Image: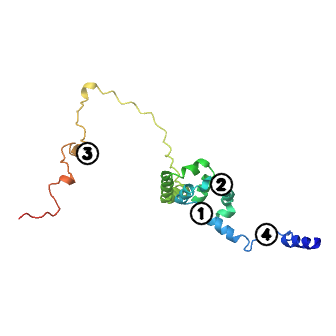
């Protein structure tokens, strides 16, 4: 009987293995999933969604975000199509930013700033890429000769005319309060069709 119980115990326990788990596709699937997730972080609305659903309160998720920082290394950044995701990944390491993204106003602010960045990206980039013209130096001045000073003019011979200053363009505009107010509600013309009496 003792031999029967020993054989039952060995049948229930798996044999010890010294082999390490080998991913069948050499990590390609994990690489693509992490790449997709990291690039989703470029969308402030998605970050807001994560904050609203309390993903940022999970310590395991925070650890996962820290793990994903390897995407900032040059050998991985070449796969990224949306570079703002790296900025937001860096910001998500800060607890204050994670808490702030739960509010819709902050989500809109981040989205607006991202829009303006892309709107002006080309012009801002050209400022730093295009060579700036070298300012021209003024030609050297010729040596000055001693010029005798003009004789003083007596004050009585100078006539000063008081000229009126040129009128400002604003003087041609209508003075405030003189323009009739146009109120669309009381314009005097009622465009609605009314039933005729009679």
Sequence-first tag of 4 and 1: 4
Q: Horizontally, is 193 left or right of 91 in the view?
A: left
Q: CA distance from mark 3 to mark 2?
A: 63 Å
Q: Nearer the viewer, mark 4 or mark 1?
A: 4
Q: Which mark is residue 169?
A: 3
Residue 4 sits in quarter: bottom right
Q: CA distance from mark 4 to mark 1?
A: 28 Å
Sequence-first tag of 3 and 2: 2
* Residue 1 visible in the shown view: yes
Sequence-first tag of 1 and 3: 1
Residue 127 pos. (x, y %): 52, 55
The quadrant of the rendering that contains the N terminus is bottom right
Q: In the rendered image of this protein, does residue 158 appear above or below residue 102?
A: above
Label 4 with label 2: CB-CB less than 8 Å? no
Residue 133 pos. (x, y %): 52, 53
Q: Circle 4 is placed at which residue position?
A: 21
Q: Horizontally, is 87 left or right of 198 in the view?
A: right
Q: Residues within 10 Å of mark 2 (few under 14, many from 20)?
A: some
Sequence-first tag of 4 and 2: 4
Q: In the rendered image of this protein, does residue 158 appear above or below residue 41?
A: above
Q: CA distance from mark 1 to mark 3?
A: 55 Å
Label tally? 4
- Secondary structure beneath dot 2 equals helix
Q: Circle 1 is placed at which residue position?
A: 39
* Residue 79 visible in the shown view: no
Taking depth in this image into account, of 60 and 141 the one nearest to the observer is 60
Residue at the farthest left position: 198
Q: Nearer the viewer, mark 1 or mark 3?
A: 1
Q: In the rendered image of this protein, does residue 23 appear above or below residue 50?
A: below
Q: Residues within 10 Å of mark 1 (few under 14, many from 20)?
A: many
Q: Circle 2 is placed at which residue position?
A: 62
- Secondary structure beneath dot 3 equals helix
């Amino acid at each position: 009987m003792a031999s029967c119980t020993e054989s039952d115990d060995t049948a229930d326990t798996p044999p010890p293995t010294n082999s390490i788990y080998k991913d069948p596709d050499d990590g390609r699937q994990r690489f693509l999933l992490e790449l997709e997730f990291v690039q989703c972080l470029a969308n402030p609305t998605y970050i807001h969604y994560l904050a609203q659903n309390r993903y940022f309160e999970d310590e395991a998720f925070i650890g996962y975000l820290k793990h994903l920082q390897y995407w900032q290394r040059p050998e991985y950044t070449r796969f990224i199509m949306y570079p703002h995701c790296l900025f937001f990944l860096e910001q998500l390491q800060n607890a204050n930013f994670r808490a702030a993204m739960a509010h819709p106003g902050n989500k809109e602010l981040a989205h607006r700033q991202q829009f303006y960045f892309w709107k002006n990206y080309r012009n801002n980039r050209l400022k730093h890429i295009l060579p700036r013209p070298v300012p021209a130096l003024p030609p050297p001045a010729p040596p000055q000769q001693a010029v005798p000073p003009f004789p003083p003019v007596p004050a009585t011979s100078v006539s000063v005319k008081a000229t009126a200053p040129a009128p400002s363009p604003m003087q041609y505009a209508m003075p405030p309060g003189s323009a009739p107010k146009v109120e669309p509600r009381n314009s005097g013309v009622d465009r609605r069709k009314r039933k005729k009496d009679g």
